[in-house]
Image: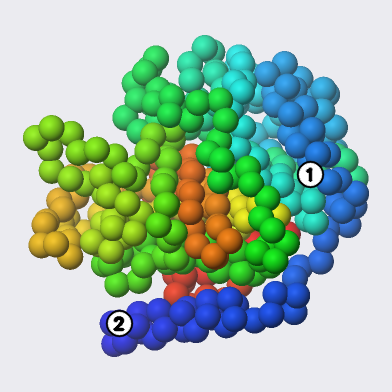
Amino acid sequence: MAMFRTTLARAAGAVLLAAVLAAPRPGLAQAGPAPGAANCNRACLEDIAERYLAAMVAHNPAKVAIAPGTRYTENGVELKLPDGLWRIASSVGKYRLKVSDPEMGEIGFFAKAEENGAPILVGTRLKVVDHKITQIESVVAHTSDLLGGAPGQARADVLGDAPRAQFLQSLPPSAQRSRAELIAIANTYWTGIENNTGSHPPLFADDCNRIEDGAYTTNRPVAAGAEPNGANYSCKEAFALGFYHDDTRLRDRRYMVIDRERGLVYAGVGFDHDATTRSYTLKNGKTVKVTRTAPWTWMIHEIFQINQEGRISQVEAILLSVPYGMPPGWDTGVHVPDPAASKDGFKEVP
């Protein structure tokens, strides 16, 4: 019966995606612009983001326009400004990956920074109404979070000073998709990774590449004498082989900032691992052993770049380990029913 329900959910999700992608783009239902949001264009939102970062490094919220009662969370925990990173941020580097949504008054961005002189990566969503910040949601990957980094040995060097070119390109108007389409395409990634067996591949482009916490986790050369792992394959190959089977639940899927002009989606999710899967067999017959013995969760902010053909080309993520099952700290959003997405479905923050 469980297998039947899973198959039915997958089929229903596939029907939903096909319906979304097949519908005429202008006719798809859209959430209305937030009041006061449409008066801040891309340049305005990006300027506010820069002012926000400058105020953070100055440890002074008064240096940026923050509305009274604005809520701030850092790694899922609500804090009062200035606290957390706002007390100890020592510098911000040149790297910025920005996702702007003038229609909804939202901007999301990734930046390289330092806290007390140690390298970190910061992902932040700002909601802007009447040129004032009304919501702040940040994730911070500290040095110890950066994929095996140790104090003074962070692994954020592959990012350089500028994001990959694909993230910066405006799509021709004829290739720009609706919010619903972009969300549905991005969701194929998380639906494909949840309990992955290789049977439900996401909509990947041939040039797909992924960076997590400043390190490539696709298309990496195999180290001498090592067995290939998921990071040594392309996006398509890794998913098709059935890697990531121990990602048992992808919950609280939130599609927070949608940049239709550039085909970008800034999203958040919790990757749960219930630790019941101790090993699994790939499509090529190789066995993957799961070394962690206790349940764990990755809190992730992830940016998807979707190309003109409607396929996921580039992926970039900031992630950190949090207590198992920890919520993101935000429960706003419009529920979009998708039985294939997991029991939580997914959400778009208005």
The residue most toward the top is 117
In this picture, residue 327 sits left or right of residue 296: right
Q: Given the image, on which type of amino acid does mark 2 rest?
A: Ala
Q: Residues at badges 1 and 2 in contact (C-beta under 8 Å)?
A: no
In this picture, residue 221 sits left or right of residue 329: left
Q: Given the image, on which type of amino acid does mark 1 rest?
A: Arg
Q: Could you say which disc has been placed on residue 142 in the image? A: none
Q: Mark 1 points at which residue?
A: 42
Upstream in the sequence, badge 1 or badge 2?
A: 2
Q: Where is residue 298 in the image (x, y as percent from the top left)?
A: 41, 46
Q: Which residue is drawn at 35% across and 71% down?
A: 200
Task: Say which quarter of the image contains residue 263.
Answer: bottom right
Q: Residue at x 34, y 45 (%)?
A: 218
Q: Which colour scheme is used?
A: rainbow
Question: Image quadrant for the N terminus?
Answer: bottom left
- Judging from the image, what secondary structure is the residue with disc 1 in? helix
Q: Mark 2 points at which residue?
A: 2
- Judging from the image, what secondary structure is the residue with disc 2 in? helix
Q: Where is residue 43 in the image (x, y as percent from the top left)?
A: 81, 39
- Residue 251 seen anywhere in this rendered image of the structure: no
- Residue 80 seen anywhere in this rendered image of the structure: yes
Q: Which residue is drawn at 28% across and 82% down?
A: 3
Q: Where is residue 9 in the image (x, y as percent from the top left)?
A: 42, 81
| Circle 2 crowding by C-alpha within 10 Å: few under 14, some 14–19, many from 20 | few
